[in-house]
């Protein structure tokens, strides 16, 4: 299994020649209602997030150089003090109570606890990418979305339904295989769990580190996708590395159809009250030290090692911690999703 995975990754890296594909695991640093990007300083923020990365994470993170604010990270690249987060997936029982879905480590990331896999990919066409600058932050997706929306145009956000344990049915690029991929939550039970893929915009206006909606300073390509080297629009001419998240939700304890809604609909819901899955979203606060991310993008690396970068074992990464600052349960059987006003979750 690991051999097949490494082989596939090697072939992938070779196919894009002198490019870099960093792919690494980050353990959970917190699960709570905080959102320093969209709701800075608000405690608690509207919905629960699962967060990985550096220990500068808090209700508000100063928009200075985050690598100077944090001193440890749950990621296996130890100079990556960035923070990455998404909404959480919950199971909704027939009696109306909710239970948080655990996250499991991806292939090759054994030792990671909770958390997710982060990718940074340089251009597929050998053009130069410009690494993010200190203070940079952005958002992908829209938590309020409940219909199939534009982001699917760039293969930006999707789910993969694992057809068997140990990543069964996991073939081909994310969001490309209609047998196992969908942009809404899978309608059938997925024996090996459900994977979230979130690809961020890859074009930058070259001046703003953030924007009021956290999205307009960046853009997806004007035509095509990052994967097929689609051009950046003239308004956002600077090509960025492609940031991508993978989160593996272990839904296997909730696959008994007798536990599912009597009408046969699927029982999973995101922490912002979204049972469609169209509202899945990811948040990013850049925090790599110095210019090491640029060096890694200019190198020819793949996977979780890269000559210009320092790594740490998960035994070390897992020691990095912060104190929870929102005093409410996010686990156990909950009568409502934390922060959601109605017990059924907001529509
Ligand atoms: C690391 O940061 C934490 C939290 O900001 C702080 O309490 C701790 O003293 C720092 N440790 C070192 C070795 O700088
Ligand atoms: C609600 O349903 C879940 C799953 O079937 C069960 O574990 C839990 O005990 C139930 N809670 C109540 C209050 O009945």
Image (tube, rainbow, N blue to C red):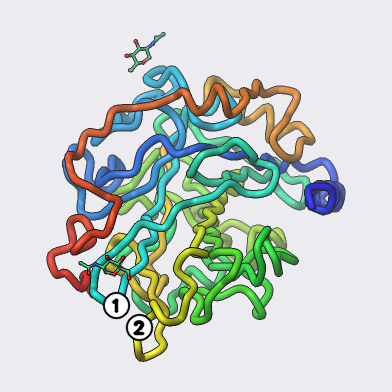
State whether label 2 is within 8 Å of ligand 2: no
The quarter holding residue 88 reads bottom left
Asked if the residue at tag 2 contacts the one at tag 1, i.e. Cβ–Cβ closer than 8 Å, the answer is yes
How packed is label 2: few (under 14 Cα within 10 Å), some, or many (20 or more)? some
Q: Secondary structure at mark 1?
A: loop
- Give coordinates of residue 27: x percent, y percent: 50, 37
Residue at (70, 64) in percent of width and height: 173
Question: Up-down: is 183 above or below 231?
Answer: below
State whether label 1 is within 8 Å of ligand 2: yes
Q: Secondary structure at mark 2?
A: loop
Question: Up-down: is 291 above or below 260?
Answer: above
Nearer to me, 142 or 167:
167
Residue at (64, 41) in percent of width and height: 109
Q: Is any atom of residue 222 visible in this view?
A: yes
Residue at (41, 81) in percent of width and height: 258
Gap between marks 1 and 2 measured at Cα: 6 Å
Nearer to me, 251 or 106:
251
Of the residues under marks 1 and 2, which one precedes in the sequence?
Answer: 1
- Give coordinates of residue 217: x percent, y percent: 41, 49
Ligand 1 quadrant? top left
The residue beneath circle 2 is 261
Q: Seen from this angle, which residue lies furthest left?
A: 341
- Give coordinates of residue 11: x percent, y percent: 86, 51
The residue beneath circle 1 is 94
Side of 342 where 60 appears, left or right? right
Q: Is any atom of residue 239 visible in this view?
A: no
Q: Quadrant of the C terminus?
A: bottom left
- Give coordinates of residue 144: x percent, y percent: 29, 67
């Amino acid at each position: 299994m690991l051999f097949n995975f490494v082989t596939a990754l090697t072939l992938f890296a070779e196919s894009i020649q002198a490019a870099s594909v960093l792919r690494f695991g980050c353990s959970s640093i917190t699960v709570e209602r905080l959102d320093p990007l969209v709701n800075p300083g608000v405690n608690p923020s509207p919905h629960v997030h699962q967060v990985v990365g550096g220990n500068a994470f808090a209700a508000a993170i100063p928009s200075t150089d985050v690598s100077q604010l944090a001193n440890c990270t749950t990621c296996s690249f130890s100079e990556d003090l960035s923070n990455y987060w998404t909404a959480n997936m919950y199971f909704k029982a027939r009696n109306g109570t909710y239970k948080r879905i655990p996250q499991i480590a991806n292939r090759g990331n054994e030792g990671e606890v909770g958390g997710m896999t982060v990718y940074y990919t340089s251009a597929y066409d050998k053009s130069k990418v410009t690494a993010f600058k200190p203070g940079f932050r952005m958002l992908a997706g829209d938590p309020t979305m409940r219909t199939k929306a534009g982001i699917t145009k760039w293969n930006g956000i999707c789910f993969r339904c694992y057809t068997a344990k140990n990543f069964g049915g996991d073939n081909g690029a994310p969001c490309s295989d209609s047998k196992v991929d969908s942009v809404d939550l899978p309608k059938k039970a997925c024996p090996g769990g459900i994977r979230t893929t979130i690809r961020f915009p890859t074009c930058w206006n070259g001046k703003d580190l953030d924007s009021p909606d956290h999205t307009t300073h960046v853009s997806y390509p004007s035509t095509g996708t990052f994967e097929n080297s689609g051009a950046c629009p003239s308004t956002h001419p600077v090509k960025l590395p492609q940031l991508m998240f993978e989160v593996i939700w272990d839904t296997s304890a909730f696959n008994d159809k007798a536990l599912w809604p009597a009408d046969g609909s699927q029982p999973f819901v995101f922490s912002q009250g979204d049972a469609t899955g169209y509202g899945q979203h990811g948040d990013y606060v850049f925090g790599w030290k110095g210019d090491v991310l640029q060096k890694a993008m200019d190198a020819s690396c793949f996977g979780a090692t890269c000559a210009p970068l320092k790594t740490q074992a998960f035994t070390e990464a897992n020691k990095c911690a912060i104190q929870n600052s929102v005093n409410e349960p996010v686990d156990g059987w909950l009568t409502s999703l934390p922060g959601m006003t109605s017990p059924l979750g907001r529509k």
